[in-house]
Amino acid sequence: MSTSGHVPGSGPDRPEDGALLVLDDAGTVLACTAAAAHLLGAPAAGISGRDAGALFAEPGDWPRLRGLAPDDRPRSLRAALRGSGGPVPVQFDLLPIEGTLPARFLLRITPAEHADRREENEALVGALFSQTGIGLAIHDPQLRLTRINPLPGDVRPGSARRDPSGGSLGLRIGELLVPEDAAVVEDRLRRVATTGEPLVDFVTSARLARAPERERTISLSALRLSGAKGAVRGVAVTFTDVTEHERSRKRAALVATAASALGRSLEVSRNAQVLADLLVPAFADLAAVDITESVLVGEEPGAFATGAPLCRVSAVAAHGGWPKELYPPGSVIRVRGYESDRLRLGSAVIVPDLDELRPRIADDADRVRLVLTDRAASYMVVPLQARGHVLGAVSVWRSGDRAPFDAQDAAVAEDIGSRAALALDNARRYTRERRTAETLQRSLLPRPLLKVTAAETAGIYVPGRTLAGTGGSWFDVITLSSSRVAFVAGHVRGHGLNAAAAMGSLRTAVRTLSDLDPPPDELLTHLDDLVVRLAEDEQPGGAEGTVRGASCLYAVYDPVSARCTMASAGHAPPVLARAAGGAAPVGLPAGPALGREGAPFEPVEVELRPGDLLAFTAGSLSAEAGGAGRVTTYLGEEAVGGGARPVPEIGREMLVPFLAEPPDHDAALLLARVAVTPEEAVAAWEFPADVKIVADARAEVARRLTAWGLDDLVFTTELIVSELLTNAIRYAGGPVVIRLIRDQRLVCEVSDPSQTQPHLRRARLTDEGGRGLFLIAQLTHRWGSRYTASGKTLWTEQLLPPHLRP
């Protein structure tokens, strides 16, 4: 050993390591480290050979240090070092050396502040590895466990206290945890060892391999341990068991998810499915939702009686299909008295261990199928109640590898169940109102299929996906005088019952106005004025009401002239598909909506040919909603004209792609394939204003009726023609036109140049005249008059003999 300079091979000295001096048995310094020279303020050569007692500021401290313990034990003393600048507080550690060399002691001198820091570090490490509140583990670079503190439940008398790892030292993480959990933890720790980036509060599942069925969640923090020259010594890990905290967090998150997910749909079955999907697998392994039949159809639930039927609306399994031993989805379940009582109480019922229940209900097949399954170990049923009524129940099961249901689970399930019940009740009430609105809407619409001489029609109404899209769209087919027919389509603002009622008001108004037989533009003008008055009655002060802003299209088709006259109040024009091929919207100005601007409505006349098809749209099928393009495309590509395919079939096929996903708003479609009255079924004569020609007119009419085989109607028709023609010549002048139309009924028309309308009155016994129209009313099935561009037309209809009716 060298007797001067610092100790060879000591390496760089760190202040916190202190200064080292080698002493012989007499206390003479034989050698020292470089830190000693720095600390003592003298070169190493000047220190060697000095007596150790000279280093102490107090002469008695050196003897006291040597006398603290036997020579074979380390001893320490806090004292003052005699430095060049005065006494320095330090800690002296005297360590004995065994051997044959002169050296007998190592004297370590550490500045007091560094000694305090070292003691704090040692106390910290000792406290960490002795406490049981926070887990502390050291892993080597290969992630083998090298040290661990005792965890709660691991500190036991005897060997367990000496080995807190329970025999786990030297094992890898994959040998301590279940494989799927170990893979996650190892990946994170390996990343810490490789990158040096610490891991802070990483929450993960950490189920022990010796107890894989026990749920265990830890919060993990880790940092890399580095040695000399940055060599990786391992990874230090701290972890705390947050299983209960994580359960509480997951329960709160589940309730929050339920609050946002339930109630988004207004369908009862959809809400039931959302509830089941929400519970599996986050809360349970199996879940089934049973709803009372009255709720499913939208009726008030009423009192829940024993034996009341419940329908299993949804059933979800975490693994595999639904167990065959349980009631499947769609089953009708009738609960017994005990179950009925529990549902009425409104609180959850827990069966923590199904094995205890099995022998008690083994002889009751219905209860076994309601509760027991080999794939579950615990069971809970939660009533679904709203406004004091039982709407149904939700049943959940957990398998044996999960903790059984407890009181906290019941509280969470009841919270979710109350939210689900409210969503189901809202959906039920919505279902009832929507069904009422649809029923009212359909009851106000005409027959879907109607075949008259002028046209073959088919109407389809499609309710919207939501109540907000139901009740506004409509269509109508109105038979007019002289074999003519009116086609109507419209849309009312608003939704639900209000829109359906407003639509009924407009439809009734259109039908009433059509009885006066005005041209389409005049009818819309009268309808516009009516809408303004209705809106004012609904909301005083002229505020906007339901009917204001409605749209309407009115078209009149005359099969004799094969012309269709139409006008629109803010409504999309119809699509015309020609029998010869091709389809396009009619060039009809939309005009203002009803009750809006009061501008005139411009009529358009279209000449049609037999087999042409008119498509009137409303709602989601209108031009504003982009649906008219689909109608035009379909009618242009398909062979729809000429009567080759039935009109109802065309309508259904046209709506198949449109209804692949139900529209948000309702839609109405009216198809009309027009026909033309044959020339041989129409006869017309023009006569001057001379009463002498009345006899000639009767003769002409009689000959034509005989040619048509209508001899039974000759006498009455002659009386009708005689009366109407005489009145026209006497009061209106000429020329006078008589027209007969042989249709499903016999139509007789007399037209004159006067626009003075006749009216029916009761003649007194002493009156010589005034009985003509009364006689007409008695002889005919219907009669009336309408204005024309050149005057007016009085018309009558007579029923054909039974053997000649179509």
Image (cartoon, rainbow, N blue to C red):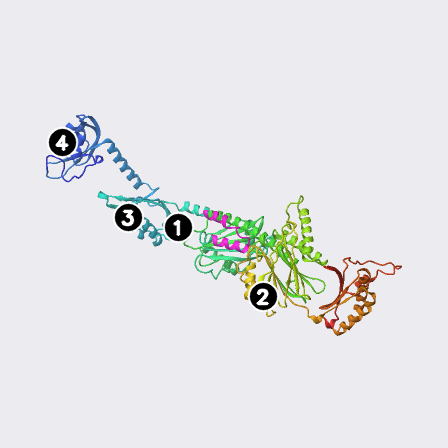
Q: Position of residue 676 (x, y in %)?
A: 66, 68
- The residue that label 3 is drawn on is 194
Amino acid tagged 1: Glu
Task: Tell me how far mark 4 sits from mark 1, CA to CA.
Answer: 65 Å
Above or below: residue 723 compared with residue 505: below
- The residue that label 4 is drawn on is 43
Most common secondary structure along the magenta stretch = helix
Above or below: residue 689 compared with residue 596: below
Tell me which label, 1 or 3, sits earlier in the chain: 3
Left or right? Give the position of 442 relative to 124. right
Q: How many marks?
A: 4
Given this view, does label 2 or label 1 mark the residue nearer the observer? 2
- The residue that label 2 is drawn on is 650
471 is within the stretch colored magenta? no
Which dot marks residue 215?
1
Amino acid tagged 2: Ile
Highlighted range, magenta = 253-278
Could you say whether the residue bearing mark 3 is in a helix, strand or loop? helix
Is residue 302 visible to us here?
Answer: no
273 is within the stretch colored magenta? yes
Amino acid tagged 3: Thr
Given this view, does label 1 or label 3 mark the residue nearer the observer? 3
Amino acid tagged 4: Pro
Task: Tell me how far mark 4 sits from mark 2, CA to CA.
Answer: 112 Å
Given this view, does label 4 or label 1 mark the residue nearer the observer? 4
- Pick the quarter of the image with the C terminus: bottom right
Report the front residue among 765 and 161: 765
Q: How many residues crowd mark 3 within 10 Å: few (<14), some (14–19), many (20+)?
A: few
Q: Position of residue 197 (x, y in %)?
A: 31, 45
Tell me which label, 3 or 4, sits earlier in the chain: 4
Task: Tell me how far mark 1 sits from mark 3, CA to CA.
Answer: 30 Å
